[in-house]
Amino acid sequence: MAYFLLSLCIIFTTLSLTSSRTITPPSHTTLLNISSSLHQARQILSFNPQKVLQQALTQQETPISPASSSSSFSLQLHTRETLYNERHSDYRTLLLSRLARDSARVNSLETKLQLAVNSVKRSDLYPTQTELQPEDLSTPISSGTSQGSGEYFARIGVGQPAKPFYMVLDTGSDVNWLQCKPCSDCYQQADPIFDPTTSSSYYPLTCDSQQCQDLDMSACRNNRCLYQVSYGDGSFTVGEYVTETMTFGGSGSVSRVSIGCGHDNEGLFVASAGLIGLGGGPLSLTSQIKATSFSYCLVDRDSGKSSTLEFNSPRPGDSVTAPLLRNQKTSTFYYVQLIGFSVGGEIVSIPPDTFAVDQSGVGGVIVDSGTAITRLRTKAYNSIRDAFKRMTQNLRPAEGVALFDTCYDLSSLQSVRVPTVSFHFAGDKTWSLPAKNYLIPVDGAGTYCFAFAPTSSSLSIIGNVQQQGTRVSFDMANSVVGFSPNKC
Ligand SMILES: *[C@@H]1O[C@H](CO)[C@@H](O)[C@H](O)[C@H]1NC(C)=O
């Protein structure tokens, strides 16, 4: 009897769902090209990073013309996959390792924000800054994972004469640093380790310098500034805080940029020599070179291609713009004023304050280059996911994978039209995603998942899977973020 009632119930639910199913007009759907995305997914497994490495290594021969920091210049941006192939046996394993790194990334951003919101400057954990001893700057929390934090890299020259290095680019942090001789602990990197004694433009910063004061965690030894950065995922760097000349390909160089010379570096930076902070704080590269704007295009992770990171370039005319907001509690993150979403041309009902950042610095939506999968507050995610599911009942469902709860078996199809997913920003601006930016392969066989995820934190993050193929411009001078599709 119970079974009978249950089956009746199921039949009834199915019927009511079917009858309320929206007939989606063609303009509200987007084509997902399954054959081409599966082809790419298979190719990336056998991709040979050596070729790209060799090409980039010869780029250092380009003569450097002097440029002022206010003029525009650009750098080649490489994906992790093109520099470093972990030789995964299948696409599922590759994906799971990306997703594990992604969770570590999100945790690390949340930890950083938590500290900022609670107004804990890390040096405040100690009675006074000067009482923090050099030996206090050492091995913090260590996690067992060694996955690697860097997802996008550029080649940047450091010192005079300039030596080229692969550096991770990170919009979620500010402090620039690279591994330095002598190493008390350095991880493996692709380039020779930077030796300050071979550079004529290496200047240690004193403890009372503004840059030293701006550090979250610092100490003083013989009036030289020592820094530490911990990323919350077990990786960290400790060393001397200095200024150096940085050189950007053939575009010119900027002197006296603050950078950490790391003698003890552990974790997760793959083969890179260090990290370039692109955050909004005073110590980031963008602030140090007084850039008024920068933009990047994140190529499709499986494409094996590279694109550019540009400073002070005009925003493409066709950009969808959104107000760039700041959090009173931290200047590092780039917040956008997100209003809501539509799926298949229908506005998803989400309470208006869901994405707002409040007075205490809690909530809001940031745009991040290092996070892969967009994280949305659970209720908002559920509404969007439910709308998407309701409009894709024609597709064969598949089991969830890792953090994805909405997956499909598309193995029998070459291509399929799916409901369009769009972000809506203040000022009635709509950014519609290509289908491959929200339905991603999770194996080489044709299983795809809806690539958004819920977060129990109040911080939402727009990740790089959603940004793929889009030029994202951060115009600090005008407080605008721009998204322009197909401008890589
Ligand atoms: C899918 O992509 C392939 C290769 O890029 C192309 O040849 C094919 O025409 C595309 N299919 C559709 C339906 O657009």
Image (cartoon, helix red, strand yellow):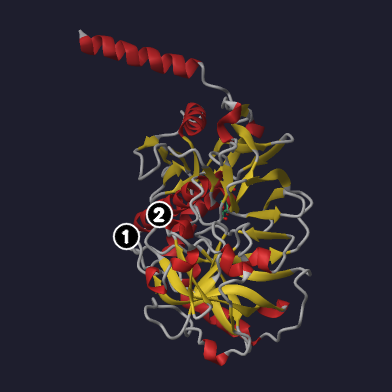
**Residue 248 visible at all:** no
Marks 2 & 1, CB-CB < 8 Å contact: yes
Q: Reading the chain from its start, which is encountered first: label 2 or label 1?
A: 2
Distance of label 2 from label 1 (alpha carbons): 10 Å
Residue 286 image-quadrant placement: bottom right
Q: Which mark is residue 372?
A: none
Q: Is residue 8 left or right of residue 151?
A: left
- Under circle 1, the secondary element is loop
Q: Position of residue 146 (x, y in %)?
A: 34, 64
Q: Position of residue 65 (x, y in %)?
A: 75, 83
> Residue at the location (75% across, 63% down)?
312
> Residue at the location (79% across, 70% down)?
71
Q: Is residue 475 left or right of residue 380?
A: right
Q: Position of residue 485 (x, y in %)?
A: 67, 50
User: In this figure, which residue is indicated by the disc labeled 1?
Assistant: 143
Residue type marked 2: Ala
Q: Nearer the viewer, residue 350 or 11?
A: 350
Look at the numbered disc 2 and say if its residue's Cβ is closer than 8 Å to ligand 1.
no
Q: Is 256 above or below relative to 333?
A: below
User: In this figure, which residue is indicated by the disc labeled 2?
Assistant: 104
Q: Quadrant of the C terminus?
A: bottom right
Q: Is 240 above or below relative to 147?
A: below
- Under circle 2, the secondary element is helix
Q: Is residue 409 left or right of residue 425?
A: left
Q: Is 233 above or below relative to 26?
A: below
> Residue at the location (22% across, 13% down)?
3
Question: How many residues crowd around disc 2 within 10 Å: few (fewer than 14), some, or many (20 or more)?
Answer: many
